[in-house]
Image (spheres, rainbow, N blue to C red):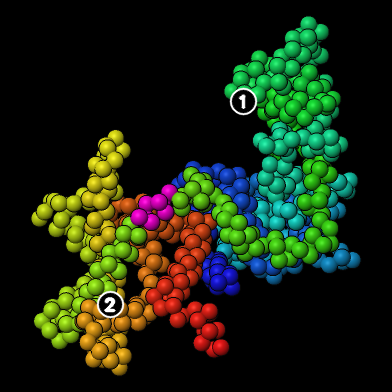
Amino acid sequence: MIPTLFGVTLVAFVVMQTAPGDPQLIQLGPGGTAGQSTETREAYLIRKRDLKLDKPLVLNFNYFRNYRDRVRLAAYFMAVSKEQLTAELPILARLAQGEILPEATPRGKPAGPEKQPPQPGEPTLDEQLSFLRSLGIDAFESRLADPEQHERLARAILHYVQTFCEDHGVYAVPAAIELLRSAETPRRLRLGAIRCLVHMVVEPFQYTYPAQTQPTDDPNDPVVAVWKRFWQLRGREYPPVEEERRAVLDRLFGRLVAEPSRSRQFELLERFNRDDTPYLVEKLLRANKPEEKVMAAAALKLFVARPLELETPPEATDAQLEEAAGNWLLHLELYRSRYEPSLLGRLGAIVADTQYAHMVWRLITFQFGRSAVKTREPVAQKIWSALVVSFPLMLMAELVIYLVAVPLGILCAVKRGTLVDRLITLGLFLLYSIPGFVAGMLFLIFLCYGDFLKIFPSLGLHSEGAENWSFFAYLADYFWHAFLPVVCLSLFSLAGLAMYSRTAMLDVLGQDYIRTARAKGLSEGKVIFKHALRNALIPILTLFATFLPALLGGSVLVEYLFGIPGMGRLSWECIEQKDFPTLMALIYIDALVVMFSILLTDILYVAADPRISFEAQDASGG
């Protein structure tokens, strides 16, 4: 069972990866800022990291790659605007067409009068062109050769460079910060490196303590380190707190730390103001209790929206550039183990830090994450809400199938060749030829819409306001709504199982031991139900392993037709919206249902015929 489950997940993973289109980029517009879901690029990136779509598929060797040159080139392009890049593209176009430009000549040869050599550290034209070609930009060569396409090409280049930064963030951060640390790095590359880091790292600093997390006395506490850096940079902007106000704050802060109610804590926090920042910083840096650190950090974040500047505009001063660079250097120091793991950690990441490994781990632990649609609902919650709708329908359909099909098959076998057999067989063939969704449409037309009859409701499983009715009225309303969907789910499988039961029963009735039982004078009922039925059940039970999964998958169209928010409709919506986390969880659950059905079938074999068991086989062998 376990290898089968892993095989199912592998096949599903391959299918999803080879499907055309990026389910995440669908949520964005052409400019990469907002699309149909009004989703920002930052939200897109957070979701991408959450789904591990920035990781390699099966094997991850990124920790062993040198990103220094590629990050330097990415920083070069990220430092300019679309208009500046558009103006630079004609030079690259001339180089791409084979023209030898002075700047692109090998070292040691004269640069010529046309172009000055690049500044130390900046990439040459050859390096720039090679890097852009490696990004996989659609129709890059033809668009580069057409001057009218340069503006759109510049926008595409910036988008692909940004995507490169997003996809290689964890692995390329040290190379980007190395550019900032070097005193020889030109201003353009320093500015570009900061912009690269903004896209490589989501939420680089932790300003408050998450819920359920207690601060420690670790000198490298990231929250304390961030506010310490903030105070070093901005402390002189705040006037000192007066002694009278300090006494008031001492009493207020003591009440805040001792208050167990969250709502009351928020009320107390509102009594502080921005001028109390020096007091709160002092409390955080000198706190002796974890509760004091938590409250001081929460209060500070309430009054200081952006403690550390991490992005700089093109017109930023050298001082602003140095400040942002220092903030990113602090980030690397606080989280160095994340970016520079040990050799053992790097070796483990080869197989463990991949899209497939993360997906399998989520499936094993039943932590399916959040939906890929903009509502960001937990996948487990979505599936549970659909499962409690579909399961009663599937259970009723399964009961109808077996309680009707098996007796019909037995009756046809016993009455073989009679008018009863022929009429039932004809009816079963007619039912077998009508798919469930066709029957559903016919039911809707003839029994629901009122053009012919209006006996049953056409949508949902409950009438409006049914939740206010009594239990029995609510239950009756449910069965009234569920009648047609259950019939649609049952028809096709019912006809097939009845015909299969008839064939199995006819095979058993022709055996010698049945003739012997009749020769002994046993009643026909005892011959049929005691001797024949038990042996005929074995092939009938074999089909049980296929009916339950078939109902789960076959309910897609039936639930869609009748407006039932169950597993089938959820599967359909996930395919339409390319909600891969939910779809992967559904495939995994389908595989579990198949395995459970096979296991249950094996148990039913033993219940139907005790001779089918390991103990019986051992006894007969002995």
Residue under label 1, please give it: 262
Relative depth, front residue between 142 and 408: 408
Please report whichever mark, 2 or 1, sits nearer to the chain's N-terminal start: 1
Which residue appears at 51% of the width and 63% of the height? Answer: 588
Residue 390 covered by magenta stretch: yes
Relative depth, front residue between 480 and 442: 480
Furthest toward the top, the residue is 244
Q: Mark 2 and mark 1: span between their CA atoms?
A: 68 Å
Q: Give residue 217's position: percent from left, percent from top.
A: 84, 35
Q: Is residue 587 visible?
A: no
Relative depth, front residue between 471 and 593: 471
State which quadrant residue 114 falls in.
Answer: bottom right
Quick one: label 1, few (<14), some, or many (20+) residues within 10 Å? Answer: few
Q: Give residue 242's position: percent from left, percent from top.
A: 80, 9
Q: Is residue 601 left or right of residue 316?
A: left
Q: Give residue 87's position: percent from left, percent from top.
A: 65, 51
Q: Amino acid at mark 2?
A: Phe
Q: Which residues are magenta?
A: 385-392
Q: Is 127 drawn above or below residue 77 in the view shown?
A: below
Q: Quadrant of the N terminus?
A: bottom right
Q: Amino acid at mark 1?
A: Arg
Q: Tag 1, which secondary structure? A: helix
Q: Which mark is drawn over residue 454? A: none
Residue 249 covered by magenta stretch: no
Identify the main secondary structure in magenta. Answer: helix
Residue under label 2, please give it: 529
Which residue appears at 74% of the width and 17% of the height? Answer: 254
Front label number (2 vs 1): 2
